[in-house]
Image: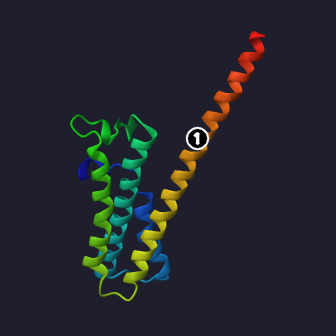
Amino acid sequence: MLDYNVPGGKLNRGLSVIDSYKLLKEGEELTDDEVFLASALRWCIEWLEAYFLVLDDIMDNSHTRRGKPCWFRVPKVGMIAVNDGIILRNQIPRILRKHFKDKKYYVDLLDLFNEHKFRTEHICSLEALALCRLRTFLFCNCQCIFKRLDS
């Protein structure tokens, strides 16, 4: 499940973590520990993106993702993909706890990931609601047009 869903994207979000860290260091080289922590954070971002995509594909009833069938369309996966998405999401605090719990910014990292998850999920809900209302609006207007054309 991890090999199918986490790698394969453009990795832009994750790569920007290391680039941003380098900018914050203002030209100083990153230590091995800093590179490791930035890489751990980078993978948390990739896991979060995989979580969003697995669930979004189900909600949108998509067929392909990154040139392959969506995870829930893989034989013998189906709606187990919902649980798999939750597993992807739940690994993030575990990774953060393992590598950042002694850092003064640990709670801020947890809060940042939770806030991003919260906002993204609400945007998806609004998008789904808007699409549903648009379909209803179009259906009702088409019915009125067809009734008038029949008259």
Decide: is 47 above or below 35. above
Quarter of the figure with the C terminus: top right
For image coordinates 43% across by 81% down, the residue present is 108
Residue 13 found in image quarter? bottom left
For image coordinates 25% across by 53% down, the residue present is 2
Q: Which residue type does callout 1 highlight?
A: Leu
For image coordinates 52% across by 52% down, the residue present is 125
Toward the top, the furthest residue is: 150
Residue 62 found in image quarter? top left
Toward the left, the furthest residue is: 76
Q: Secondary structure at mark 1?
A: helix
Decide: is 41 above or below 122. below
Name the residue that disc number 1 marks. 131
Q: Position of residue 27 (x, y in %)?
A: 47, 81
Q: Position of residue 100 (x, y in %)?
A: 31, 81
133 and 151: which one is in front?
151
Q: Is residue 83 left or right of residue 139?
A: left
Q: Position of residue 5 (x, y in %)?
A: 31, 49
Q: Is residue 39 left or right of residue 76?
A: right
Q: Position of residue 79 (x, y in %)?
A: 29, 42
For image coordinates 45% across by 66% down, the residue present is 16
